């Protein structure tokens, strides 16, 4: 998570407010400030294909005013094969250009990657680039850089996206995913950016290829002939991942937390899942994290694969502890502000007095959070069902 200077992590609540909020969220059932249920997401408005001159685009606006737009752009790029060094790479490319595009994949010192030597349609992770633009942040600030890395990690780990960008052994598509957060980050924006990216990739199309083999790529002029990056008619393949933000307060698990709720979280986890009808994810059914839903006869079956799990540093650790009355000199307490008073404030547990979380998180808590995301009829399935209802 970003440093404490970030507007999304800087706690703006007093110790008394933090204590009240933590107590409310620790009840059974928890009481959230906006009256939502623990598994309930904020209402949202979604649109697709809103940006011209892009291969795909989407917009999502949450009920609290957070809004994001994602545009996907694909460009043809010449594949540079790995050789002994940078000089050999340039020499190979220059030789091909001088010979009118002759294929010299097997020359140049025995180099050549897996694509160029075998001709298979495997891609490279470097063909996908994710950038985030947030108001009030530089491009190299920790928050947008970290968010971009998390989204890119989930995209590459979820399936065969790089392979979809393969054209031939000499050329490939380079995919640029440009994310624009239109509003200031009113809460941790990772779920908003992830859901918008998911829809933008579902709407992305690539021009139909008319060239053959290793020829210079040429494409059909009619955009209606373009093929979807994730064809909606093919139900037996992976879909773009979504990343959900989950937090734990005591024994309770809360989804889609607001900024104020994050300030009292004992643990925050970003869980990325992908819809995979073949359950081809990194974690399968045998380990308990692969799930499948359907009508019992295999039709309409959708598997959920766990793609990645990332711990997010809770901003509750940045807050100062409350002061119990017995050590508060203003309230007539017997202990002053010396070392003993500081020890009581930091280590003592007094009901109704805020104390920031210290130490790590139990594995059982993390397992419970992941299970609630992945289980049949769980939160991930509910979110994916809602996104499938958006007109592409």
Image (tube, rainbow, N blue to C red):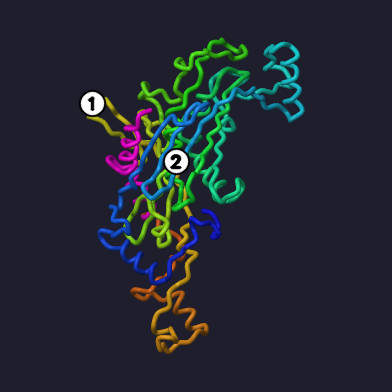
- Dot 2 corresponds to which residue? 194
Which of disc 2 and disc 1 is earlier in sequence? 2
* Spatial CA span between label 1 and label 2: 32 Å
Name the residue nearer the viewer: 331 or 304. Answer: 331
For residue 281, what is the image quadrant?
top left
Secondary structure type for disc 1: loop
**Residue 301 position in % (x across, y down):** 29, 29
For residue 356, what is the image quadrant?
bottom left
Name the residue nearer the viewer: 306 or 167. Answer: 167
Say which residue appears at 56% left-offset and 39% top-offset: 131
Highlighted range, magenta: 365-392
Magenta stretch: helix, strand or loop mostly: helix
Instruction: Tell me if label 1 and label 2 are in contact, CB under 8 Å.
Output: no
Q: Is residue 286 above or below residue 141?
A: above
Side (left or right) of 148 relative to 43:
right
**Residue 84 position in % (x across, y down):** 73, 28
- Badge 2 density bin: few <14, some 14–19, many ≥20, Cα 10 Å: many
Secondary structure type for disc 2: helix
- Dot 1 corresponds to which residue? 297
Say which residue appears at 48% left-offset and 83% top-offset: 340
**Residue 89 position in % (x across, y down):** 72, 25
Side (left or right) of 157 relative to 232:
right
Q: Is residue 192 above or below residue 116?
A: below
- Badge 1 density bin: few <14, some 14–19, many ≥20, Cα 10 Å: few
**Residue 29 position in % (x across, y down):** 25, 58
Q: Is residue 239 above or below residue 183?
A: above
Say which residue appears at 63% left-offset and 18% top-offset: 170
Say which residue appears at 55% left-offset and 22% top-offset: 166
């Amino acid at each position: 998570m970003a440093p404490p200077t970030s507007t999304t992590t800087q706690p703006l609540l007093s110790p008394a407010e933090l204590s009240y909020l933590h107590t409310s969220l620790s009840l059974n059932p928890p009481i959230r400030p906006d009256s939502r249920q623990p598994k309930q997401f904020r209402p949202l408005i979604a649109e697709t294909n809103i940006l011209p001159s892009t291969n795909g685009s989407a917009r999502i606006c949450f009920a609290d005013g957070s809004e994001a737009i994602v545009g996907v752009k694909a460009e043809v790029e010449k594949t540079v094969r790995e050789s002994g060094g940078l000089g050999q790479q340039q020499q190979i490319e220059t030789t091909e250009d001088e010979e009118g595009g002759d294929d010299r994949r097997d020359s140049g010192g025995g180099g050549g990657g897996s694509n160029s030597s075998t001709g298979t349609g495997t891609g490279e992770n470097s063909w996908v680039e994710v950038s985030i633009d947030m108001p009030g942040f530089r491009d190299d600030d920790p928050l947008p850089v970290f968010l971009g890395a998390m989204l890119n990690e989930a995209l590459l780990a979820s399936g065969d996206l790089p392979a979809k960008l393969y054209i031939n052994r000499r050329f490939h598509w380079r995919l640029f995913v440009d994310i624009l957060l239109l509003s200031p980050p009113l809460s941790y924006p990772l779920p908003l950016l992830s859901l918008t990216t998911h829809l933008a990739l579902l709407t992305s199309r690539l021009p139909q290829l008319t060239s053959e083999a290793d020829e210079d790529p040429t494409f059909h002029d009619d955009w209606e002939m373009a093929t979807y990056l994730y064809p909606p008619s093919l139900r037996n393949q992976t879909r773009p991942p979504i990343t959900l933000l989950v937090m734990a307060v005591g024994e309770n698990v809360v989804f889609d937390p607001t900024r104020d709720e994050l300030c009292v979280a004992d643990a925050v986890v970003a869980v990325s899942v992908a819809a995979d009808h073949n359950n081809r994810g990194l974690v399968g059914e045998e380990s308990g994290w692969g799930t499948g839903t359907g009508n019992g006869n295999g039709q309409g079956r959708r598997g959920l694969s766990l793609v990645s799990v990332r711990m997010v540093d809770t901003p509750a650790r940045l807050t100062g502890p409350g002061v119990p009355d017995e050590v508060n000199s203003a309230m007539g307490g017997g202990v002053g502000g010396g070392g003993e008073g500081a020890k009581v404030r930091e280590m003592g547990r007094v009901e109704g007095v805020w104390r920031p979380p210290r130490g790590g998180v139990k594995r059982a808590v993390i397992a419970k959070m992941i299970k609630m995301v992945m289980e049949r009829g769980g939160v991930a399935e509910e979110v994916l069902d809602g996104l499938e209802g958006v007109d592409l």
